[in-house]
Amino acid sequence: MDSVVYGPVPSWRLGRSLGIDLLSTKGKTCSFDCLYCQLGRTTHPLAERREFVPLARLTADLDRIPPMEADYATFSGVGEPTLASNLGPAMETARRILGWPVAVLTNSSLMPDEGVRQELALADVVVAKLDAPSEDVFQMINRPTTPYPLHEVVEGIRLFRSHYRGKLALQMMFIKENKGCVAQMARLATELSPDEVQINTPLRECAVDPLPPEDIAVIKDGFKGLGVVVTVYEARRPRIAPVNAKETLRRRPKERS
Ligand code: SF4
């Protein structure tokens, strides 16, 4: 059986990051089917949470990793990590065994769920996706399976922000479909008051073209006054070889956006 732990991988957002895939399904299990997903189409669309990986298996896999250093243990992988109903206890397990800060990359689809917000609040860093300022753009880009309309997702992020004491980053992926929405997206970001805005465009191989650096620079200008705003083109990717790749750790060729 493959390990649920992979990497460490270099991340433009999180430095050196040991990945944990709490879904570990064959093929992508996600509540979105984003146009730009580098993992291809969503093979297992899902809207409700359930347990995929028992804590005992996660504990065994974490206990097996060789000594190494990393900046974060990051719950991400091939799909949406908040779909795992044991995400909260899994974060506590990872923190206890590894002693590192814990990050979660979420597509925000389940932010309207209070239980999900409570579990996410256990993380040191939450990177929350928000690609659309309106329902039609949301449906066009993210193609959600979840029943929540965009305004409920945004309200969920707002509620999360109001209680969360860790670092909240909003990640906004820009492609040609939402390139004209910069002013509305910047207004949303202002309302949500994240610690950081991460402006992204899909640089890894996928079904849509990335925006060029000059377009991303113009988009960043639209977020002036918002505090920390970083773009994928500015971020320096650390050149880190995986530690003991021959050991039990898997190296994923791709990780979600
Ligand atoms: S980009 Fe992320 S949220 Fe979107 S379909 Fe892929 S895994 Fe799911």
Image (cartoon, grey):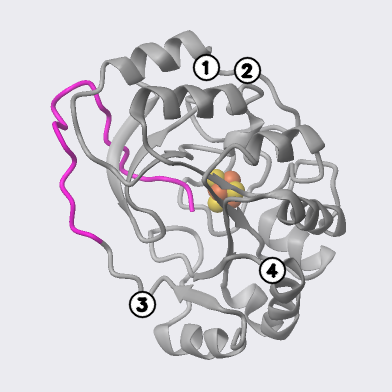
Q: CA distance from mark 2 to mark 1?
A: 6 Å
Q: Earlier in the sequence, mark 3 or mark 2?
A: 2
Residue 106's x, y, as percent? 59, 46
Q: CA distance from mark 3 to mark 2?
A: 38 Å
- Crowdedness near tag 2: few (<14), some (14–19) or many (≥20) residues, C-alpha within 10 Å: few
Question: Which residue is the site of mark 4?
Answer: 193
Decide whether the magenta segment is chiefly helix, strand or loop: loop
Residue 26's x, y, as percent? 47, 25
Q: Toward which corner of the image does residue 13 lie, by quadrant?
A: bottom left
Circles 2 and 4, Cβ within 8 Å, touching? The answer is no
- Crowdedness near tag 3: few (<14), some (14–19) or many (≥20) residues, C-alpha within 10 Å: few
Question: Which residue is the site of mark 3?
Answer: 234
Q: Earlier in the sequence, mark 1 or mark 3?
A: 1
Inspect the image, locate mark 1, and give the three-letter code of the amino acid beneath it: Val
Residue sticking out furthest to the front: 165
Inspect the image, locate mark 2, and give the three-letter code of the amino acid beneath it: Glu
Question: Which residue is the site of mark 2?
Answer: 51
Q: CA distance from mark 3 to mark 4?
A: 22 Å
Residue 190 part of the magenta segment: no
Of residues 106 and 71, the one drawn nearer to the viewer in this rendering: 71
